[in-house]
Amino acid sequence: MNNALEIKDLRISFASEGKRVEVVSGVSISVAEGKIVGVVGESGCGKTVTALSVMRLIPEPPGKIDSGNIIFDGGDLLEYSEKDMRSVRGNRISMIFQEPISSLNPVFTVGDQIGEVLRTHLKLSRKEEKERVLELLRLVGIPAPERRIKNYPHELSGGMSQRVMIAMALACNPEMLIADEPTTALDVTIQAGILELIEDLRVKMGMAVLLITHDLGIIAEVAEEVYVMYAGKIAEHAATAELFREPKHPYTVGLLNSIPDLRERKEKLDAIPGVVPSPGTFPKGCRFQDRCPLVIEKCRVEEPPLTEHAPGHYSACWRADEVTLEI
Amino acid sequence: MSLKELVKIEGLKKYFPVKSGVLSRVTNFVKAVDGVDMTVREGETVGLVGESGCGKTTLGKTIIKLLEPTDGEIYYDGEKITNLSPSRMRAYRRKMQIVFQDPYGSLNPRMKVESIVSEGLVIHGVSSGKERREIIRELLTTVGLRDDALSRYPHEFSGGQRQRIAIARALALRPDFVVCDEPISALDVSVQAQIINLFIELQEKFSLTYLFISHDLRVVKHISDRVAVMYLGKIVEFAESGELYNNPLHPYTKILISSVPIADPSRKREPAVLKGDVPSPINPPSGCSFHPRCPIAVEKCSSVEPELRDAGGGHFVSCHLA
């Protein structure tokens, strides 16, 4: 299967108090055509910065993509001119963000904002434009779109605004959708609907999706493949079912065991001790060492590379083969 | 856990006025809490779940009288505290504390941790000088912070540590009842579990009673003895935790539970997706306030409001069809 998007050995740093601090340290992610690939990690692990770099939306300065490639349709997005990039953004690759309400412009109507995307990328008559906007609103499940088209963002609920954002992202039939925590700001009942919508659209439109979240539950529900990120690096990568069944990185195990389960009640949650190290303070060797139950001397000296431990199952841990769900 | 009722509320209402026009006349009310009956027994944890805007935070704040109730009664340890004067209320304030959602917003950035945690002790004139410092030191150790935290400022701490400071502050006066208002929602996943474990440990250590407010059904199930489900200012279901999750009776509870993503890719669920949006609490629908979104609503539901009734064994539900 061909890859819709391939991020290769990406390194990103930010200027902070006169120093350059690396926030993404050699991350590679590929998304096959028509697949939903999840990236899971906690705040500060670099998942959002990675996503923004695909759209070339990292503010430079202070940010800078130091090295790596982002391969899309045979070309390297990092070498595109700003003008070329504009024809990709919102047209062939689209992105939706966590805060739907603040991502919409409060002074334009819903119809205007979706129409803007169409006007930028396609040459449509006013009538065709309106038709397409209505069609998109219907596609994302907004009731009475003829009325909604005249609404301003403040007149919409959180779930509705996220649907409008998705409609906007889909306006030009993109080949690739990047969804950064698309449901974090929403209630569970609304979340279920939005996830179902993304899955549904992928099937209908054959779109590839890069789904970024902190919730392993969401990964389990919709993603076929998953990358676990920790402190600017990929800790583990596998097919979703395999990752949940036989995780090979202690951080993944920690994440899995710290979620309370709806079906059985655990006496005590197995919390991961300590806190996520912030960029610039990463220890020498493995970045998870201070929180890891399996830590050995080697982990403090040498950084474990991401290696294949079973077909298609990668882990960056010196003791990956000893990792089980019960550590 | 005893069967003694520590906190009891009857018909509790909290309305916020909506003003409009040039004269700012009160034209309407937001019915944030609209007639809630509930009991919290000594030593137990009652979980309160619901979607954003359902009134769960307002209910938590009204129970400890951070907000004046519009109507209804609040009893604490058998005493009616609804209309106590501020000075008489003070004795009760010591016994009821709250931990807020956002540890970034709830700690004064200009105060050192020592002052933050000791503020309650100062106000209530409990201990002084060396003795007070010793109490604070012990509290900080209890919540898992190092000694040197005393002389530092909130910005020097991570979210999880700040929440520990907020918990130490709430416990300084040795309360019996603590309202935990979404205390872990702002934290990282790996840190959430640490704080949940801390809440459970502290409950055992100090025999605390919790009202645990959260939108996260997984967390509420883990920590609660009994769980109340709130919708548009009303409790729609209230039961022992295991019973509620295994045998939900209200259609809203059923949908809520089935919407929770489960970290098990081998299980393919068919989520019951809820139609429409939460209606406005200014003009809640007639009859059962859930009827416009309810998959099983019948004609009666739009005209007659169901009462919260015991469906057997202390499992309360307000639905005509349950």
Image (tube, rainbow, N blue to C red):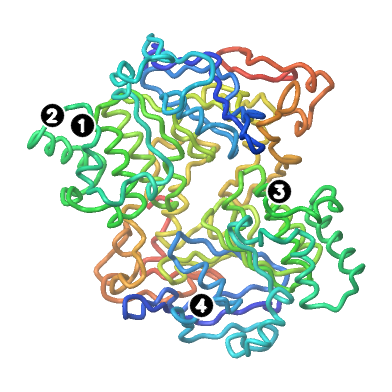
For this view, does A110 lie left or right of residue A237? right
- Percent position of residue B124, x then y: 22, 26
Q: Residue furthest front?
A: B23
Frontmost residue, B148 versus A74: B148
Q: Give the side of residue A94 with respect to residue B2, left or right.
A: right
Using the numbered discs, state the Cα–Cα distance from disc 3 to disc 2 in whole angstroms.
53 Å
> Disc 4 designates what residue?
A59
Residues at discs 1 and 2 in contact (Cβ within 8 Å): yes
* Direction from residue A268 to residue B308 in the image, left or right: right
Q: Do marks 2 and 4 share a chain?
A: no
Q: Residue A46 in the image: x percent, y percent?
A: 47, 69
Q: Residues within 10 Å of mark 1 (few under 14, many from 20)?
A: some
> Disc 4 vs disc 3: Cβ atoms closer than 8 Å?
no
Label 1: which residue?
B121
Q: Chain of mark 1?
A: B
Q: Is residue A113 above or below residue B231?
A: below
